[in-house]
Amino acid sequence: MPKSPEEMAQAMIANMKDKTGKTLEQWIKIAKKSGSGKHGEIVRFLKSNHGMTHGFANLVAHKTLKSDAGSADTDLVATQYSGAKKGLKPIYDALIKAAKKCGDLEVAPKKAYVSLRRSKQFAIIQPSTKTRVDLGLNMKGAPAKGRLEASGSFNSMVSHRVRLENAGDVDKEVTTWLKKAWSDA
């Protein structure tokens, strides 16, 4: 049974024709012809117009846009922390170091953020502005208090957000929240 997201994606690609009637390449052509240029639009199009399940539609959207780590032509993390956001890389590095202390995890870069996974996603790291990295955490049921905000419109894949402006913000409080999210995953 596949373990990593890349292995799961490869298994889905291998089974795609049997499950959906078309190969990945055929679905990518259909997605491109739709005229949709955004991930969510492609997913909605494939689900509503072609009856595709969310998992397959998500995979096709990522492959169409080359927005997953397996499809990207460049180093996604390096791209995220380039230009005006270059100074934010120490925050990312501090978060990765803290997350790895939690235990076994997978670091899965996407086009705009990095997903941290155990058995499921427990956190995301996103350089949101030129001066701030947002740490999204999955801690359903935890009260939003102080720096631990409700995620709101930040990202529907997480329940909470912490705004970080320098590497020193990755303190004991943040590492405690990371550990909690990791252990819940």
Image: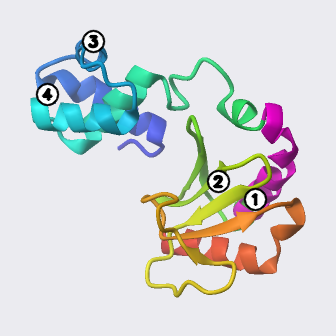
Residue at (13, 27) in percent of width and height? 20
Identify the main secondary structure in magenta. helix
Q: Identify which amino acid the numbered label 2 is placed on.
A: Ile
Q: Are marks 1 and 2 in contact (CB under 8 Å)?
A: yes
Q: Nearer the viewer, mark 4 or mark 2?
A: 2
What residue is pinned by disc 2? 125
Q: Identify which amino acid the numbered label 4 is placed on.
A: Thr
Q: Which mark is residue 29?
A: 3
Please report the bounds of the magenta region as a residue range.
82-99
Q: CA distance from mark 4 to mark 1?
A: 39 Å
What residue is pinned by disc 1? 95
Few, some or many C-alpha atoms within 10 Å of disc 3 (few <14, some 14-19, many ≥20)? few
18 on left or right of 150 = left
Q: Are marks 4 and 2 in contact (CB under 8 Å)?
A: no
Residue at (59, 40) in percent of width and height? 112
Q: Identify which amino acid the numbered label 3 is placed on.
A: Lys
Whether residue 144 is visible, yes or no, is yes
Is 96 magenta? The answer is yes
